Every structure is written in C-alpha cells, then in structure tokens.
C-alpha cells in the first residue's frame, strides 16, 4: 500500500485518494482538490458577474448580467472563453482574460458575430 501526505490538509492518505496526473498522484488529495475548485469557482463567478454589471459597449443598455456577454475585442489575444476560465483559471488569470473584453448585450453580440 502506498500512502502520501496531502500538501493542503496535511493528512496521510492512500494514493487511491488522489487524482492521478500521468500516472503520478497529485500533491493534493481529491477531497481538497474538489474543495479548492469549488471555492475558486464561486470567487470567479463573482468576478464575472461584476464585469457584467456594466452597460452594453455597443448600445449602452443596462441589462441583467445573464443577458450580457463578455466579448473579446481582439480575437487573436483570446486565450480562453471566459465561461471556461471560471472553472479552470485562477482569479488573477480570469481578471487578465476579462481585461481583454467588453460587456456586450446578447443581441449586439450576435450582431457583431453574425450581422450584415
């Protein structure tokens, strides 16, 4: 039986209780990894909501955050969709990605991408 000490909770657990990366257990047990991911996601959702509490860059309408998209001004600078970054990036990296975007209401966003 192989055991390993979690770098987060400091408990020694069997290696089956760790996510594997390329056949090697991660440094943090799966329980701590899940808790850290949940916490990061909650923080990141707040960051995105804050970025969406602004008027549409195109038409100036103030709408609910659920009706606002974050549009990358320069697609060549886009590293990741903000919606994916909520779960996969640190708050700092998410803010960095959001800084490349402007808030746009959904109708204007569709017009930008699919309009005449």
Image: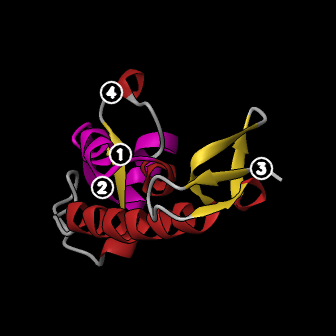
Q: Position of residue 90 (x, y in %)?
A: 36, 48
Dot 4 or dot 3: first in sequence order is 3
Mark 1, Cα crowd under 10 Å, few <14 / some 14-19 / many 20+, is many
Magenta part of the chain: 89-116
- The answer to whether the residue labelled 2 contacts the one labelled 1, judged by CB atoms less than 8 Å apart, is yes
Residue named by callout 4: 74
Disc on res. 2: 3
Does residue 97 show up magenta in the picture? yes
Dot 2 or dot 4: first in sequence order is 4
Q: Main secondary structure of the magenta part?
A: helix
Dot 3 or dot 1: first in sequence order is 3
Give the residue at x 60% y 59%: 29
Does residue 109 show up magenta in the picture? yes
- Viewer-nearest of labels 3 and 1? 3
Residue named by callout 1: 71
- The answer to whether the residue labelled 4 contacts the one labelled 3, judged by CB atoms less than 8 Å apart, is no
Dividing the picture into quadrants, the one containing residue 41 is: bottom left
The relative height of residue 87 versus residue 71 in the rendered view (above or below) is below
Residue named by callout 2: 104
Q: Marks 3/1: CA distance? A: 48 Å
Q: Secondary structure at mark 2?
A: strand
The relative height of residue 65 versus residue 81 in the rendered view (above or below) is below
Report the side of 100 relative to 67 (left or right). left
Q: Marks 2/4: CA distance? A: 14 Å
Q: Position of residue 102 (x, y in %)?
A: 24, 47
Residue, far top = 76
The answer to whether one can see residue 4 in this image is yes
Give the residue at x 47% y 38%: 80
Q: Nearer the viewer, residue 55 or 53?
A: 53
- The answer to whether the residue labelled 3 contacts the one labelled 1, judged by CB atoms less than 8 Å apart, is no
């Amino acid at each position: 039986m192989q055991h390993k000490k979690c770098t987060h909770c400091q408990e020694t657990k069997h290696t089956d209780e760790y996510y594997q990366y390329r056949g090697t257990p991660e440094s943090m047990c799966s329980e701590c990894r899940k808790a850290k991911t949940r916490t990061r996601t909650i923080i990141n959702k707040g960051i995105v909501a804050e970025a969406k509490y602004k008027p549409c860059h195109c038409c100036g309408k103030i709408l609910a955050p659920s009706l606002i998209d974050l549009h990358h001004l320069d697609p060549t600078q886009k590293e990741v969709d903000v919606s994916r970054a909520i779960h996969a990036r640190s708050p700092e990296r998410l803010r960095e990605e959001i800084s490349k975007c402007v808030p746009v209401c959904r109708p204007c966003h569709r017009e930008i991408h699919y309009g005449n």
